[in-house]
Amino acid sequence: QIAALHTPIHGLGQSLDRSLQHLGVQLPKNASLDQVFAYEYRGEVGNPQWYLDIAKLSGAALQREIVLLLAQNLQYQYIAFQERTQLAALEAAQLAQQTEVEYRPVVNTMNRITANNGGNQ
């Protein structure tokens, strides 16, 4: 997952360039998700001028900015959900493999005992 966040995505920077244009930054053409997050942070919350600009906004423009930030937050939550889901799937696969390795001999032994007992009746 960490490597995936740092892996350049073909055309990502180019496709997000217009939506991040208001931050005064230009993403690399093949940006990674990590780069996008860093640019967004530096251009908004990490930028003192952003707070001054927010203070000057009209009510409607401020509401628009709030909606954009909420949408951005939802995107981050979705990415975190995807990561947790993938990690849970990996852990389930590891547990299944471990269970198979540790308990297959027990099952085989029980099957032999059952087969032998069934033949003795």
Image (cartoon, rainbow, N blue to C red):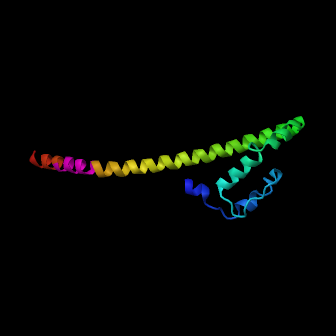
Residue at x-position 58% and y-position 44%: 81
Residue 53 as seen in the image, left or right of residue 33: right
Spot occupied by residue 120 in the image (x, y as percentages of width and height): 9, 47
* Magenta region, main secondary structure: helix
Query: What is the span of residues highlighted in magenta in the rendered image?
Result: 103-112
Front-lying residue, 115 or 69 = 69
84 is higher (above) or lower (below) than 8: above
Residue closest to the far left:
120
Spot occupied by residue 32 in the image (x, y as percentages of width and height): 65, 58
Front-lying residue, 118 or 47 = 47
Residue 98 as seen in the image, left or right of residue 53: left
Residue 101 as seen in the image, left or right of residue 78: left
Residue 119 as seen in the image, left or right of residue 30: left
14 is higher (above) or lower (below) than 53: below
Q: Could you tell me which quadrant the C terminus lies in? A: top left
Residue closest to the far front:
48
Spot occupied by residue 62 in the image (x, y as percentages of width and height): 84, 37
Q: In which quarter of the image is residue 60?
A: top right
Front-lying residue, 47 or 26 = 47
- Is 54 part of what is drawn in magenta? no
Badge count: 0
